Amino acid sequence: MYLIDKPYVSAFLIDTIKENNYQLVAIKSAKELVADDSLHWISEEEAIASLKNNPSQPIYSNSENALGWIEEHLGESELSKQINILKNKAEFREQIKTLFPEFKFRKIKLENIKDIAAEELSFPFVIKPSIGFLSLGVYIVKDINDWMKAKEEITSQNLKSIFPKNVLDTSYFILEDFIHGEEYAIDYYHNERGEVVLLNVLHHLFSSGTDTSDRVYSTSKAIINQHKAELEKFLSIIGNKLNLRNFPAHAEVRIDENGKIVPIEINPLRFGGWCTTGDLLGIAVGFNSYKCYFENACPNWDAIYQGKENKIFSIIVLDNNSGIQPADIAEFDYKALADDFDNPIAIRPLDINKYPLFGFVFAESDSGNKKELSDILTSDLRKYIIIRE
């Protein structure tokens, strides 16, 4: 069963639903996004009854916006409670604190942030919305100067959002230890026995030690093989703690130089947002992670990457870090952007006046040529922006 909601659904995901005759719940926003009556639409009433009668059935949502529907109609279910634990970063930390007893965190109201004195803090740390999305409102605080700057910028006015409160809620923030190491994003699911099946592992690249953006995520056969076994074991421990079954998720973790894994967050019932990481390998090498989850299958990575063993597949998130206000932007030159990649598999434009992004690039690179990725990682995108006259 699929719950489709705004802001975006890809043609790849819709084609997957159509070709496999998967059930699609006819909520209003889904009907507005997808104008195809030939899909296997089911009514909201039928979906609610089905989920109550068979709560362990596979379900997937493309967007965290849809989680509100589950809360509204199935608020007392175990599924809803699991979603709420994972979505609320402070609650998630509470649930797993026995697994990470040395990890420090605290929850605080937005209006009380200004009153926290430096003497109360242990640097470095991270501050972010307890319910967040797209790295909005996330700050790495290394010293007193960073803290003073963060306190000035973390205001309700600066953090106004297009997303509903169940996706981004800045009423409460969480202060937590800064996790050292390389960051990875993982698409996976817990099968009917609770076992973890990895569907992708992406290295989240940063331009500096204080960078919190989502600009570049890269995967390859080598990255998956290097981390697969330990990540499956690690995520199984958390899944068992929360009793997750037939449950898709998108985790973000850091792995230090000693191989220690610490979770940043786990996003429930979906893979990467905006149909990104879930689509990537389908578009690039023909591996459909959505279908893999619904068929309770395990990927054969040797077969998936046959002939592509030395390729890197990346998602580039075109956040507007130019300093130019959307109202002053006439257009974005996607052709010039495409020309800066050896093999841009797909470019998905977005309206910068509606969303905080110009769109996404899906790219294939040779493992020996990472310059195009480092260039876009540090780019302010101004070379692609045409200003209004």
Image (cartoon, grey):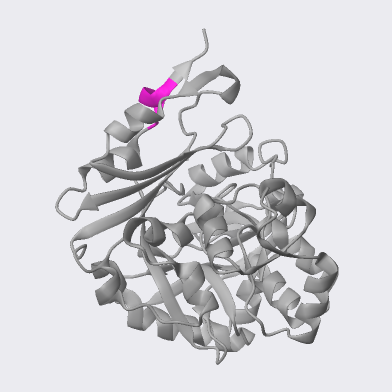
The correct choice, above or below, for 224 with respect to 206 in the image is: below
Would residue 301 be visible to someone looking at this image? Answer: yes
**Looking at the image, residue 91 lies above or below residue 113:** below
**Residue sitting at the far front:** 38
Q: Position of residue 357 (x, y in %)?
A: 53, 38
Quadrant that contains the N terminus: bottom right
Comparing 103 with 357, the one in front is 357
State which region is magenta.
Answer: 380-385
Which quadrant would residue 225 be assigned to in this image?
bottom left
Q: Residue at x 49, y 26 (%)?
A: 323
Q: Is residue 127 left or right of residue 88?
A: left
Q: Is residue 382 magenta?
A: yes
Specify whether 181 is left or right of 240. Answer: left
Q: Position of residue 377 (x, y in %)?
A: 34, 42
Residue 112 visible: no
Compared to residue 137, the image places residue 58 above or below, namely below
- What residue is shown at x 46% (from left), y 69% (from top)? 289
